[in-house]
């Protein structure tokens, strides 16, 4: 669902794919996040999503009052404190989405789908 911003001069519609892309790029800047995981995890196999597939690990829901709810399915780096990664991810994504898109982020939900050793390649 797209978000709409109304101004005195007209309205701006921001597609949920754009919101997910901005949120995904912000998430990949966070320490400890190796990548996104596919939302539709079947049979316990988690697929690491990078690059153009980043948005497949993020679910965007726009509420009636134009607040955005973001749901992340992530893979974290082995040896890092998951609560610290989650706190950093939540605050970074909230700030960047609100700053870049002008939308209020109501909630950021994080689902850790896997742990990997980060080889340094993204």
Image (cartoon, rainbow, N blue to C red):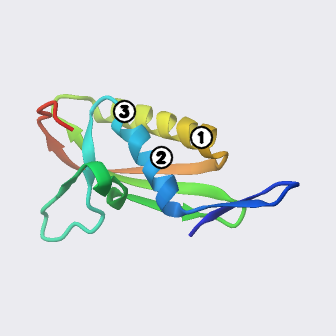
Instruction: Classify 10 Å Cα crowding around label 1: few (below 14), some (14-19), many (20 and above).
Output: few
Is label 1 in contact with label 3 (beta carbons under 8 Å)? no
Q: Which mark is residue 85?
A: none
Write down the residue under mark 1. 100
Of label 2 and label 3, which has the lower sequence position? 2
Kindly state the secondary structure of the residue where label 2 is placed.
helix
Tell me the residue at 68%/59% (across/down). Answer: 66
Q: Which mark is residue 29?
A: 3
Q: Where's the N terminus, which quadrant?
A: bottom right
**Residue 119 image point, x, y percent:** 11, 33
Is label 2 in contact with label 3 (beta carbons under 8 Å)? no
Q: Is residue 43 left or right of residue 101?
A: left
**Residue 55 image point, x, y percent:** 37, 57
Is label 2 in contact with label 1 (beta carbons under 8 Å)? yes
Which quarter of the figure has residue 5?
Answer: bottom right
78 lies above or below 114:
above
Tell me the residue at 82%/54% (across/down). Answer: 7
Q: Where's the C terminus, which quadrant?
A: top left
Write down the residue under mark 2. 22
Instruction: Classify 10 Å Cα crowding around label 2: few (below 14), some (14-19), many (20 and above).
Output: some
Observer able to see residue 15: yes
Observer able to see residue 112: no
Kindly report the distance in space between the C-alpha atoms of the residues bearing marks 2 and 3. 11 Å
Tell me the residue at 38%/38% (across/down). Answer: 86
Tell me the residue at 62%/46% (across/down). Answer: 101
Kindly report the distance in space between the C-alpha atoms of the residues bearing marks 2 and 1. 8 Å
Q: Is residue 37 left or right of residue 90?
A: left
**Residue 85 image point, x, y percent:** 34, 33
Of label 2 and label 1, which has the lower sequence position? 2
Residue 46 or residue 28, whichever sits in front: 28
């Amino acid at each position: 669902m797209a978000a709409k911003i109304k101004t005195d001069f007209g309205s701006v519609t921001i597609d949920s794919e754009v919101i997910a892309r901005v949120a995904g790029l912000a998430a990949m800047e966070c320490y400890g996040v190796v990548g996104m995981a596919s939302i539709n995890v079947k049979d316990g196999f988690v697929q690491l999503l990078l690059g153009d597939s980043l948005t497949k690990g993020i679910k965007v829901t726009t509420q009636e009052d134009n607040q955005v709810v973001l749901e992340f399915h992530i893979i974290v780096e082995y040896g890092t404190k998951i609560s610290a990664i989650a706190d950093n991810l939540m605050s970074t994504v909230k700030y960047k989405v609100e700053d870049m898109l002008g939308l209020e982020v109501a909630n950021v939900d994080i689902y850790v789908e896997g742990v990997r050793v980060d080889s340094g390649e993204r």
